[in-house]
Amino acid sequence: MTYRGFDAELLEQLDDSHRTYLLQHVLRAIEPASMLSKHVSSAGGLATELPRLAAARRSHERRGQPQARLLGRLGDQADRSVAELTALWPGNPLAGGIPDALDALLPDVERFLTDEFLVAWEHDPGWPKLVRLGDELACLVATTGRDPETLQRDLTNVARGHGDAAAFLDALLPPHRAYQVACVVRGAEHLDELAAFEPTARQEPLKHAHRLGFGPATQRLRAFLDGVEPGGCVVIIETRAPDKPSAARMVRRRLTELLDQYVAGHRLLTLALHPETVVCRAGELDTLRFRVPVGNTTRARPLVLGAPDELLGALRMAHQARATDSPTTAIALAWSALEACGVERDPLAKALALQVLRQQVADTRHLVHQSVTAFERTARKRAARADAVLRSLTGDHPEVGARRAEALRRKADADAEVARIEAELVAALDRIAEEAPVDAFHNVVDLNAWFRMLRRGEELVPRLHPLARRQVAEWRDAVAGEWLECQRHRLLRVLDAVYATRNQSLHSGVFRAEGDTVLGVGAVMVVDLTLEVLGNWYRRSRTDRAPSAVIRRLAARYDAVGGFDELDLVRLTSPREGE
């Protein structure tokens, strides 16, 4: 996949510094298609850990869920995050430990993190602080519901305008503004008593939608509704959000939850939202037609043929977890998928840590390719612009002649940069491919060969963007035991959070929890990673070993790991002879 942090238009506006790393780190972490091990749901930032712990404490006091043992695990995870932060910033607000009255301290934690961002923007604090600050900022951004694509566009605009640290911080964490969101509900022309549930709601049958105002954007709303098939009603709800896509998601979730009331009141009724939603900022003309993203592929393949019954049950739960609009429902279904497999928390975290190792080694190759490609695209865009300017300068006027000479110089410089990138960076990729070949999709064919190159610590490519450069450098000095243990703890953090949130929701009947949007993505990622491991095993093994037995076997491999150099990454999570 291509991470948003490697968008050529954004990188063209940034320098090769720690600042760029911070932005790339945040963009990758909040990307829903990122790997679990790099996603914000496993980062352990205070902005996600502390509110979750506070909510779990309140729920435990009221309903006894999560139970004391699980609550203790959540507390241990939060303590670990605070200890890691305190080792880097001894003066943070939680340096003395996590207090019982946690909610009152959350604003102080947010101020501390934003202040540290402003300091780090001006003065490079070094890699340990940059990496941790990137995780903390990503968690802070994710909790606001910021849309990754919109954030990247806003960061590009700030960079293009040579914004300062405060401007970039405002792009990362903008104030929530008022938006109007229009949704089409299928299955009913009117929702009785809707205002009792949502005071800002306005509605009309679709056939009378012209009665609804949408401020300066009214005509744009009507143009959209003219293209919608008849039937149903239009509901407009006001909300406050950091951007338009976030507003659309918030209102769609809110309205989906409200529809539960009406479905419960009509046993045979089916209500659903139209996939497209119109959003405008209150009082403004500009609108966004937000559509729920749907993935497509040319050919779809089954996970595995002849899977055990336990795995078949998990596949059904996993499918439903991906399809639901409710993050908390996704969390509950994801945990049910793991339970259907019969796997246990501790062995699962160890087995998945091995698969994370494979993923991250392969991902490093993708990052290198994306970085070189971004350099090449940026250089070619500059060359194309220089050529366009040169072509536009015609005539014999002396002033035109002077401008043409300058344009010629700029074009020559741009063409030279393209040639330099091809000779240095693209050629370096070709040399890497000779020792560690890739397929048509730039996937490494032999992970072992690529990993050996990373471990040698040689300069593989003369120039890389900060995020790729950092990930390449990490493998040079990484110690197997420490690295895998770090990944195991990240996975345990997600598993404990998923289980606790599932218990809180099912016992309270309230399918909304602190940080559930971020955790909902992480929960599905855990299931996907588990199914990836099991599917790979069953495709290569003729035994009828149960999923729980497979996971325990891989956990034993985790315990037996000595050093990186002795590992066979190609078959790290695959069955060996006789298995």
Image (cartoon, rainbow, N blue to C red):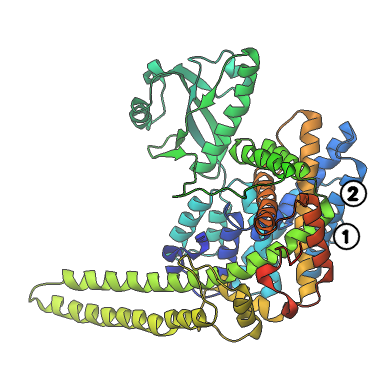
Classify 560 as above or below 509. Answer: below
Q: Which one is earlier in the sequence, the residue at label 2 or at label 1?
A: 2
- Does any portion of residue 561 appear in the rendered image? yes
Q: Tell me the residue that label 2 is attached to.
A: 72
Q: Nearer the viewer, residue 37 or 284?
A: 37
Classify 242 as above or below 260. Answer: below
Q: Secondary structure at mark 1?
A: loop
Residue 327: % across, % down:
65, 39
Give residue 96's mark. 1
Classify 239 as above or below 84. Answer: above
Residue at 88%, 60% (x, y): give it.
96
Q: Nearer the viewer, residue 351 or 360?
A: 351
Position of 32 compared to 232: left or right?
right
Position of 69 compared to 555: left or right?
right
Residue 166: % across, % down:
56, 60
Residue type beneath disc 1: Gly
Residue type beneath disc 2: Gly
